[in-house]
């Protein structure tokens, strides 16, 4: 029986994927973790923890580097919440184009003013006159699971769309509407567009991607939407630009003390992925991933180890080894098994950067001595022996 700890509330649809051999446990000794935005950086992980699954996209709340060092596989659920974010981006865009935040706040103030509401509304509504999205230019920074959906949807709404992603994957490139304009320069996007929406991960390289320099020459009155991560935008620079009016709206889904209470800054309480559908999608994907890893050793959607899949276990035992990506690891492992009369029925070896993963199906039993000797091979980070009880 495996134990997993959930650091956030995970939709029940996901927990039912875990099957009979995995249970959620509140204790400190667990084999794996499922979480959403909980900050795992300050948490001491269980010595038995082998896998962390982020039910969602961003893994900046997970200490990925230290997990990699310890041989803990970190996974996420790519695309599972993309539609929810796309829809909130459209809502945010319309909210800024039609001044909906100010307009709806204003109507509420009439309640205590003892006025004819219907008449006052008709008299004052011109104060909130907006613009249509149709025909306006929008820049989409980051064309991954979310960015592609956003770009395509905004094109369908009649906008002129400019996409920017120097690391665009082939898979996502296939899904981009051919009418989306390709942009090579983030500053140029800000110069040309009426709206910009950001959909990149928070990494060392993307910190303050939208900074003073980018904002300095931006189109006057541009509206900037950040439903990705706070650190992607230099907050001092954007607040200054909002204050002097050169940015007419800043929408953030990741508010903090600094951005609250400012005029023309719309703060959403991190609702991008908060829909019934998206929470279920993420949880189901996370449940399936953690189960397949714990029971079969298969790695899918990992952000630190290679994809590796030997299917469900059919042989007597499966040896799963995380090791350094250096010469002769597979040679040493297979010699060690041969010298202990263990026959390899099937195997796979995949690498990613400095690390690699080897899975070996064997017909024999694998005793403690073999496990111990495998762990002693230089460059081996962890060894798991999965036994087939069926
Ligand atoms: N507000 C919310 O609730 C949510 C926020 N997010 C945030 O949105 C981010 C993106 O999510 P997905 O689209 O699912 O991820 P994704 O991994 O599918 O796409 C990210 C894209 O950004 C691109 N990229 C990386 N560095 C870049 C750079 N310097 N300039 C331009 N593009 C760059 C990548 O090539 C990739 O295509 C997540 O990392 C997360 O931080 C994601 C889901 C929900
Ligand atoms: O998936 C992401 O990156 C998100 O930001 C969504 O976060 P959440 O799962 O709603 O806490």
Image: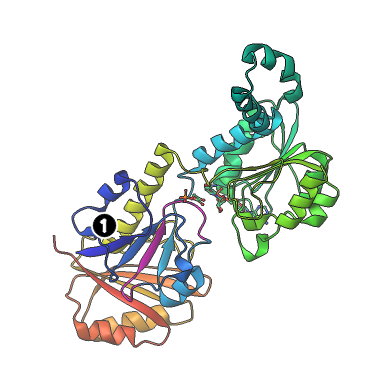
Judged from this view, the residue extending furthest toward the left is 390
Q: Secondary structure at mark 1?
A: loop
- Nearer the observer, 58 or 369: 58
Q: Give the image location of residue 282, x and y in percent.
A: 41, 47
Q: Is residue 338 visible?
A: no
Residue 247 visible here: yes
For the record, the magenta segment spans 46-59
Question: Which quarter of the rendering shows the C terminus?
Answer: bottom left
Labels in figure, total: 1
- At a point 36% along the width and 51% down the height, the residue shown is 9
Quadrant housing the N terminus:
bottom left
Identify whether 233 is placed above or below 50: above
Q: Main secondary structure of the magenta part?
A: loop
Q: Is residue 354 left or right of residue 286?
A: right
Left or right of residue 330, residue 361 in this image = left
From the viewer's perspective, tell me whether residue 131 is left or right of residue 285: right
Asked which quadrant contains residue 380, the reply is bottom left
Vertical arrangement, residue 259 with respect to residue 87, above or below: below
Residue 218 lies, in percent from the top left, at 82, 45
Q: Which residue is mark 1?
A: 312
Q: Position of residue 204 (x, y in %)?
A: 64, 66
Q: Residue at x 70, y 30 (%)?
A: 97
Q: Is residue 48 magenta?
A: yes
> Residue 372 in the image: x percent, y percent?
27, 85
């Amino acid at each position: 029986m495996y134990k997993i700890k959930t650091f956030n509330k995970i939709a029940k649809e996901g927990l039912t994927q875990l099957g009979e051999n995995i249970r959620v446990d509140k204790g400190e000794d667990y084999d794996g973790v499922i979480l959403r935005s909980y900050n795992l950086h300050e948490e001491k992980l269980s010595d038995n923890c082998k896998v962390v699954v982020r039910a969602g996209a961003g893994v900046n709340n997970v200490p990925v580097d230290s997990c990699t060092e310890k041989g803990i596989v970190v996974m996420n659920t790519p695309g599972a919440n993309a539609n929810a974010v796309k829809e909130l981006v459209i809502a945010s865009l319309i909210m800024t184009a039609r001044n909906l935040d100010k307009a709806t706040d204003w109507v509420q103030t009439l309640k205590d003013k003892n006025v004819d509401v219907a008449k006052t509304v008709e008299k004052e509504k011109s104060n909130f006159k907006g613009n249509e999205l149709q025909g306006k230019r929008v820049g989409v920074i980051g064309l991954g699971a979310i960015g592609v959906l956003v770009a395509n949807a905004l094109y369908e709404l009649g906008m002129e769309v400019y996409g920017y992603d120097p690391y665009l994957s082939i898979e996502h490139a296939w899904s981009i509407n051919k009418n989306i304009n390709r942009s090579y320069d983030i500053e140029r996007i800000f110069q040309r567009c009426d709206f910009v929406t950001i959909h990149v991960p928070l990494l060392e390289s993307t910190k303050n991607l939208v900074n003073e320099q980018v904002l300095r020459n931006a189109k006057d009155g541009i509206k900037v939407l950040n439903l990705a991560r706070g650190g992607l935008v230099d907050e001092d620079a954007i607040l200054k630009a909002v204050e002097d009016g050169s940015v007419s709206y800043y929408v953030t889904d990741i508010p903090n003390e600094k951005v609250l209470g400012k005029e023309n800054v719309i703060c959403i309480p991190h609702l991008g992925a908060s829909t019934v559908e998206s929470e279920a999608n993420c949880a189901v994907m996370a449940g399936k991933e953690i189960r397949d890893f714990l029971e079969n050793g298969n790695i899918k959607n990992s952000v630190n180890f290679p994809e590796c899949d030997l299917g469900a276990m059919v042989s007597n035992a499966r040896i799963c080894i995380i090791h350094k990506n250096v010469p002769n690891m597979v040679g040493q492992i297979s010699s060690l098994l041969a010298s202990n009369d263990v026959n390899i029925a099937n195997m796979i070896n995949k690498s990613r950067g400095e690390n690699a993963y080897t899975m070996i199906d064997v017909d024999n039993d694998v005793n403690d001595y073999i496990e111990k000797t495998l762990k002693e091979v230089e460059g081996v980070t962890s060894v798991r022996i999965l036994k087939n009880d069926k």
